[in-house]
Image: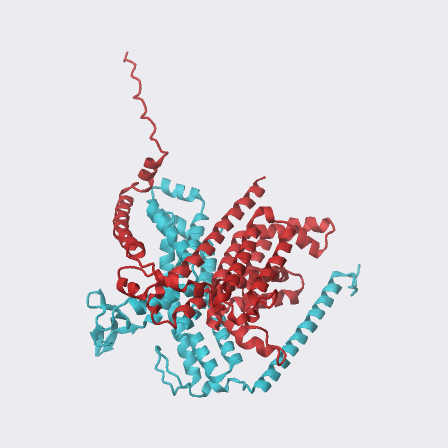
Amino acid sequence: MATPPKRKWSWRSGAGRALVYQALLVVVLLGLLAYLASNTVRNMQARGIQSGFGFLADAAGFDISESLISFESIDPYWKAFLVGLLNTLRVAAIGIVLTTVLGTLLGVGRFASNALVRGACYAYVELFRNVPVLLQLLMWYLLLVEYLPAPQEPIHLLGDWVFLSKGGLAFPVPQWSPHWAWSVPVPSGFLMEGGATVTPEFLAVLLGLSLYTAAFVAEVVRSGIASVSRGQADAAASLGLSPAQTMRLVTLPQALRVIVPPLTNQYLNLTKNSSLAVAIGYPDVVSIANTALNQTGRAVECIAIIMLVYLSTSLSTSALMNAYNRRVAIAER
Amino acid sequence: MSAFLPLPARPAPVRNRGALPWMRRNLFGNWPSRVVTALALVFVAWLLPQAVSWGLWHAVFERSTDACQAARGSGACWGVVAEKYRIILWGRYPFEQHWRAELASVVLLGLVVASCMRRFWNRWLLLGWAVGLSIFFGLMGGGVLGLVAVPSDQWGGLPLTLMLSTLSVAGAFPLAVLVALGRRSNLPLVRSLCVVYIELIRGVPLISVLFMASFLFPLLLPVGATPDVLVRVLAGITLFSAAYLAEIVRGGLQALPRGQLEAAASLGLGYWRTQGLVVLPQALATVVPGIMGSFISLFKDTSLVTIVSLYELTGALGLALNGDADWRPFKIEAYLFIAAIYFCFCFSMSRYSLWVERQLAQSKAR
């Protein structure tokens, strides 16, 4: 019986070289890490920077303009970060819904039989994706706070139900007071009584992010639809399906397989871009961390928190979308 | 016996070329289409006069705040651009030295445009870049040939945007190719290192990387050695976009059939020659649209450095208007001005990408 050849660890064997290269890599990496760590420790000592996450229990000492949970300046830092996280998630979740609807419409519109619809969708995509999203956020914010009327005389968007002004957007919400009823906003001086109000900062971030990302989603949808072969649409037409039915029943389900992975990336981009809210003062997790960083000087900890938040959001979103992708991909033969 | 009856002649074919038949098909094809066309025409008829009246007819082009205030609400104030364009374009650069920033931008822009043209794709281009970049930094930094020295914290506006995007492209591209190759390497350690780098960077927003560049990088270096904030931000953007670019390059690597690698191996090519001569030329060609898209988003992303207090185009606009109560009400016109600048750059890049794709399709069709 032949014995398996003994492995020779020499420079002439690929496995031997691989081992040497990787050992070298480990040494270099460890050396680099040790060097950076020792520099950091020495720099922190030299500048008298304190470290550790102990500051999270201290009182924050600043107010937050909008929050889903009650927050006061005597509350600890960790609660401030939680408020920021909730604000980030809120704008990202609503933005994802808006951008999906708008982006799908725009993407499907590129295949309309009417040339004006095709042209308008094309113009939208080119216009919105070729201008930096930060600039778009700043422009929306400026438009909202400069050109809208004062809170005393708001625009009636929907009769006496929805109001838009410099103070933000006020809309009715269902409320439990003895029984379920709509709490309708009523303008009274500078404030709205009843209903719910979102600030212009929130609106600007939401509008800017959704409209910008919609241009990319439209391209994703368009290329997905274009990837479905013409024969499919021809076959559907010969079965007597209307163009709308063809799109809904034949083309889109097949296009989804191509669309879902890049669509996930766009959702993640929208979530990550919500960090630009710091530029217009919407209290998302980055602007809270920025404030905390300036107050406490703990750069390492604050940046670590930002990264942790976004990494966990990114990873969980992509896990969710991968699960969905497995479901749509199952139609494969 | 019945009489012979010929079938009626077929109708003449409908003319389907030219403008009128096109309009019949694409604008008035069926009832929904007709309704949409009619609605769109009404909308344009309502919007266009207003837009022209606001942007041109009633707009104020002179540099007078009084005239602009008088026209507020009815016409745009392009006077703000006429008044402030130098600060918007050149940032905090010393006023009497602006010609240097202008010249430096022209040199850099010329280099980029030349690099895009096929006739310059030879070894002289590298020399051109070396010379061009020295001229750029000589002009911007000064201190040579009798030019007044301008510290880099006073650089701003368009030259800064151009410099940040070209240099980070130049840095990110080679890094991305290496990382993409590393992610497909046979060495498990190299592979996992590249995966961690890519996923870590792609999981966080650019702002956090820029915060790192401005707050953390100084802590990582030896005590006392603090590199220029420009260099740190440049390193941050480069590391960030290299991760995205690496994933695009990996897509190209994966699209390459295994046979190519086997053929290279049977010719006796080693790892680096296989990658350099066989794999990369084909892999990169297939992902040109992705690479160009990533360059475009890098160009747009340079606008974020304003958050860490560098005054590139977007930051310089805030610099020009935030402190000036007279002109601040007309910020939206100034925003439109720089949005137009960004649009021109990005749109021409995406058109160029289409041209490169066509060139490559020709080479494939042979």
- Count the numbered circles shown: 0
**Is A24 on the left or on the right of A63, as rendered?**
right
Looking at this rendering, what residue extends furthest in the top direction?
B1
Quarter holding the N terminus of chain A is bottom right
* Residue sticking out furthest to the front: B146
Would you say residue A130 is visible in this rendering? no
Q: Is residue B147 left or right of residue B56?
A: right
Q: In the shown orientation, is residue A186 left or right of residue A110? A: left
Image position of B282 with respect to B310: above or below: above
Q: Looking at the image, which is closer to me, B107 or B296?
A: B107
In the foreground, B175 or A22: B175
Measuring 26% from the left and 64% from the top, which residue is drawn there?
B70
Q: Colour of chain A?
A: cyan
Query: What's the colour scheme?
Result: by chain
Percent across and percent down for residue A133 are 42, 63
The location of residue B34, given as percent across then percent down, is: 27, 44
A240 vs A31, nearest the viewer: A31
Picture coordinates of residue A215, whole percent (x, y): 40, 57
Determine whether A62 is above or below B17 in the image: below
> Residue A207, position in %: x, y?
35, 64
Q: Quadrant of residue A22?
A: bottom right
Q: Which chain is red?
A: B
Residue A45 visible in the shown view: yes
Foreground of the two, A62 or B26: A62
